Amino acid sequence: MFIGEYQHSIDEKGRLAVPVKFRSKLAKGAVVTRGLDQSLFLFPMAEWEQLAQRLSKMSIAQANSRAFARLMLAGAMDVSLDRQGRIILPEYLRSYAKMGKQLVLAGLYNRIELWDKAIWQRYKVATEKNSTVIAEQLTDLGI
């Protein structure tokens, strides 16, 4: 399980150090892809395979299904940890997420979200401001 929030820099070659706490879960390979809310998603290979299988079963007759599958699958890239525990984030994904040099890695149970630090801060402030409303809406889901 991935939990926690970590700040790291990305170097000029697009390399990002993964927190030590997360590395063992990514040792067998991982996939980084376009995420939501201007983020990237980083999945361990086993989690990615489950998600990709579910995406492949969505109806190609529905425009939203096609669009979401394209977003997630066409943008995906296999990544692996180097000896220093870094991954390389492709330029097209960094551009999609408008990433600068400072990133936030947020552990979200089965994935890690990668955010530009400034975008994350704005998102977090807005979410915290609306946390009561969000919590009330989630009670319908039994949370």
Image (tube, grey):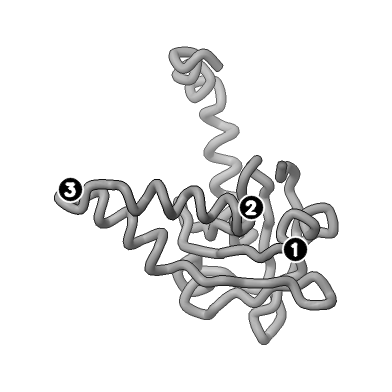
Q: Circle 2: is it few (<14), some (14-19), or many (20+) Cα within 10 Å?
A: many
Q: How far apart are labels 2 and 1 at the CA level?
A: 14 Å
Q: How far apart are labels 3 and 2 at the CA level?
A: 28 Å
Element type at marker 1? loop
Q: How far apart are labels 1 and 3 at the CA level?
A: 36 Å
Q: Which quadrant, please, contains the C terminus?
A: top right
Assess whether mark 3 and mark 1 are in contact (beta carbons under 8 angstroms).
Answer: no
Q: Earlier in the sequence, mark 1 or mark 3?
A: 1
**Numbered disc in front, either 3 or 2:** 3
**Amino acid identity at mark 1:** Ala
**Amino acid identity at mark 3:** Gln
Q: Could you say which is closer to the camera, residue 101 or residue 87?
A: 87
| Left or right: 73 in relation to 81 | left
> In the rendering, which numbered label is found on residue 112?
2
> In the rendering, which numbered label is found on residue 107?
none
Element type at marker 3? loop
Q: Which residue is mark 3?
A: 62
Q: Which quadrant, please, contains the N terminus?
A: top right
| Left or right: 37 in relation to 83 | left
Q: Position of residue 7 (x, y in %)?
A: 75, 59
> In the rendering, which numbered label is found on residue 27?
1
